[in-house]
Amino acid sequence: MTPRGFAWKAKESNRNVTVAALDLSKLRWLRGGRAMQLAISLKAGSTIRFEGLKSNDFQDLQSFMRQHFGKELLIVKQAVRGWSWGELDVSKGAAANLIFRTGGGESAKNKAREFEDSFEMPLGKVANVQLPGNAKELALDFHVDDTAAKMDEELVEMRFYIPDEEEAKDSFERIKARADTSAFAGESMCSFLHMGVAVPRGRYDVDMYANYIKLRGKAVDFKILYSSITRLFLLPKPDNVIVSFVMSLDPPIRQGNTMYPHLVFQFDSEEKTRIDLPLSADELQAKYKGKLSETEEGYTWRVFSKILKNLSSTPLHVPKTFKSSTGASGVRTALGANEGFLFFLESCCVFVNKPPTYIRYDDIDFVEFRRMDLERRFDLFMSLTTGSSATYLFTNIERSEFEHVFQFLYESRKVPVENAEQLKRTGGRQRVTLADDDDSSESEDDDFDPLVQAKDKDDRDSSDSDSDAEIEDPDDDELKHLGGAKPPRKKKKR
């Protein structure tokens, strides 16, 4: 400390902080997390805190500041009762702080009770503010620190319940005006209403903006930056009725203590929609290289996938070469107590719906086929490498799928399989030979329909042999259904 201000330098880095005396607004003394704390409020509105001081430093600091700065070092009255209700305030200045105070009112002896500071935080750390639900609950989302270590804890969300609706709206406007919500600015480009979402379960209205996507539900809203989207998957279920769309996130969204690294959307395969984008042809050409049109129409799952793929600049992965015994891209199975479908893609496999699970083939240490002595079912055990140190057991897979799964994993994708040679000899089924695809990478083309390749293969096969044309191809049935035919009737479970 000098008559010209304060200076602080880190011991283990080159970081330093300087505060000029002319910029000082208020000086406060309070108890911090580990020791005493000196809080310096600047005229611009921000606050700098120095922590680690001793209690007996107060007198020396107070004398120094009176002499050189002409300011008093104020002792802050801090809340120690543990109350969770009080008064919400926003400080003035460009770099404002959110202040929560408790107390107030009258004491038991009818004396006015002063408010005490409970906590204070800079609004520059607030990434988003909203009034979900009944417009009385104020929700704050904070910027995620991508430099934090895995075991570090950080504040990601805070909610205030404000009984008075007008006061809640006023607090919302004051915080929104000072929060750093620049990443979530702009007008909506398109909306999809009442969309079914399996994870997190519910129905949401989905709005797509230039920089982010917003999910609006009855009880909670989510805003997801496109930069947080790592992968997109389009997975047609074997029942030909539902198409699943999986969005992988890093960092994941959070609802309470539950983290959602994958979102699973559910589409009716026959539902159609029309979307008019508020951009001219020149703007679409400049921003999205002509991959989007002013009007996108067709099956809802296709329109949604195409728009999100191009707005987020994220590759869209679809199943290509794997075919089950019924010609589907996945097999029915269960992970733990949850039934679902396991889809085999070119570089990974994905399980939907709960819990959505993504497994790269390169991360698999070995695969083991279990309960092969049963007539109708078998299990698939996957052990990942030591870096991932995880195992997955997919149970009750139809026995008719063994040859297809074994061939794809062991021979096509070179995944290590326990007792592979013995399984080849005693599999109990005639081996199915899958044709190798010259392009083993996952589809990222403009035409990303997961059924296009199946259709092309059928056309080639029908031209090669007249006898093949007489065989009813399940892939062709799937194409007809997606074009408007009735889905096959589901078998009743016993």
Image: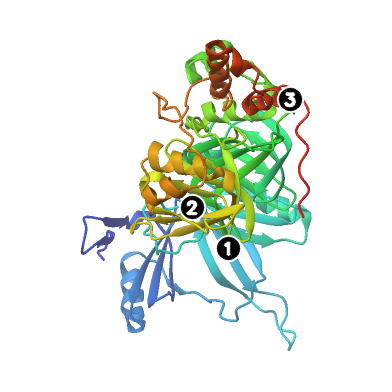
Q: Is residue 88 above or below residue 57?
A: above
Name which residue type carries label 2. Lys
Q: Residue at x 62, y 16 (%)?
A: 469
Residue 108 image offset from top left, x and y in percent: 74, 87
**Relative horizontal placement of residue 359, taking residue 80 as reference (left or right):** left
Q: Which residue is mark 1?
A: 257
Is there a contact, CB below 8 Å, between mark 1 and mark 2? no
- Identify the image quadrant of the C terminus: bottom right
Residue 390 image offset from top left, x and y in percent: 43, 60
For residue 81, what is the image quadrant?
bottom right
| Mark closer to the observer (1, 2) | 1
Residue 125, label in figure = 2
For residue 401, what is the image quadrant?
top right
Marks 3 and 2 sit apart, C-alpha to C-alpha, by: 41 Å
Q: Residue at x 69, y 21 (%)?
A: 298
Q: Residue at x 56, y 50 (%)?
A: 356
Marks 1 and 3 sit apart, C-alpha to C-alpha, by: 36 Å
Quick one: label 3, few (<14), some, or many (20+) residues within 10 Å?
few
Q: Which residue is mark 3?
A: 272
- Identify the image quadrant of the N terminus: bottom left
Name which residue type carries label 1. Asn
Is there a contact, CB below 8 Å, between mark 1 and mark 3? no
Tell me the SS state at disc 3.
strand
Name which residue type carries label 3. Lys
Q: Between residues 272 and 336, which one lies in front from this camera angle?
A: 336
| Mark closer to the observer (3, 2) | 3
Marks 1 and 2 sit apart, C-alpha to C-alpha, by: 21 Å
Q: Between residues 401 and 163, which one lies in front from this camera angle?
A: 401
Q: Between residues 273 and 321, which one lies in front from this camera angle?
A: 321
